[in-house]
Amino acid sequence: MGFWIFVVKDHLHGKEVIPAGAIASERVKHGFWLVSSRIAAMKELAEGGFSVFFSTGVEGRLFIGEGVFSQQPQPITDEMRFHIKGYPSEKLTHFIKLDTAKLWTNPVKLEDVLENLSFIKNKLRWYGYFRGSVRKIPEQDYKYLVSTASSQS
């Protein structure tokens, strides 16, 4: 088991921009999170874990929810493709089935918690820590983000 940040960005569908929050909402609704088969952490993800969802784009840089998963990433099914819209999701090949997932009523702004996140060593160049779709984080950072979100509710 590990602790993770699952990142979602704004998507392009033709000329339309789909906000990252809308993409995350669809994923949570259908109980899956998309990942690339080439991520370095694929073996570690197979052990399952706890995740915080991070959204970045036109709506801002926000921690927006949480989920739990217990199965290793699997190839995307044909049925699942029906729910996938826009780039970059259309290019992703695998998914993580979420056992439980929810979006928070009051998202947590990155700027409000940046100084307290230990996995971000260089606070001036924080953006490098959110490249890709998955990031392993220490348990203390996971608990801090979930606690911060629940205290804002």
Image (spheres, rainbow, N blue to C red):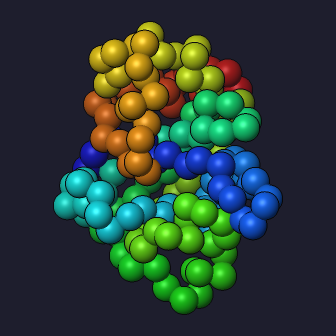
* Residue sitting at x 31%, y 25%: 119
The image quadrant that residue 28 belongs to is bottom right
The image quadrant that residue 44 belongs to is bottom left
Residue 131, compared with residue 89, is above or below; it is above
Q: Count how many numbered circles sit on residues in the image.
A: 0
Percent coordinates x, y for residue 75 in the rendering:
39, 79
Left or right: 2 in relation to 18 = left
Left or right: 138 in relation to 9 = left
Percent coordinates x, y for residue 150 in the rendering:
61, 27
Identify which residue, 99 or 29, lies in the foreground: 29
The answer to whether residue 117 is visible is no
Furthest-bottom residue in this view: 78
Furthest-right residue in this view: 16
Identify which residue, 66 or 80, lies in the foreground: 80
Identify which residue, 38 or 14, lies in the foreground: 14
The answer to whether residue 48 is visible is yes
Percent coordinates x, y for residue 110 in the rendering:
56, 23
Percent coordinates x, y for residue 114 in the rendering:
48, 16
Q: Where is the C terminus found, in terms of image quarters?
A: top right
* Residue sitting at x 29%, y 57%: 39
Residue 75, compared with residue 41, is above or below; it is below
* Residue sitting at x 57%, y 34%: 63
Identify which residue, 113 or 153, lies in the foreground: 113
Furthest-front residue in this view: 15
Furthest-left residue in this view: 43
Residue 57, compared with residue 60, is above or below; it is below
* Residue sitting at x 50%, y 61%: 33
Left or right: 5 in relation to 45 = right
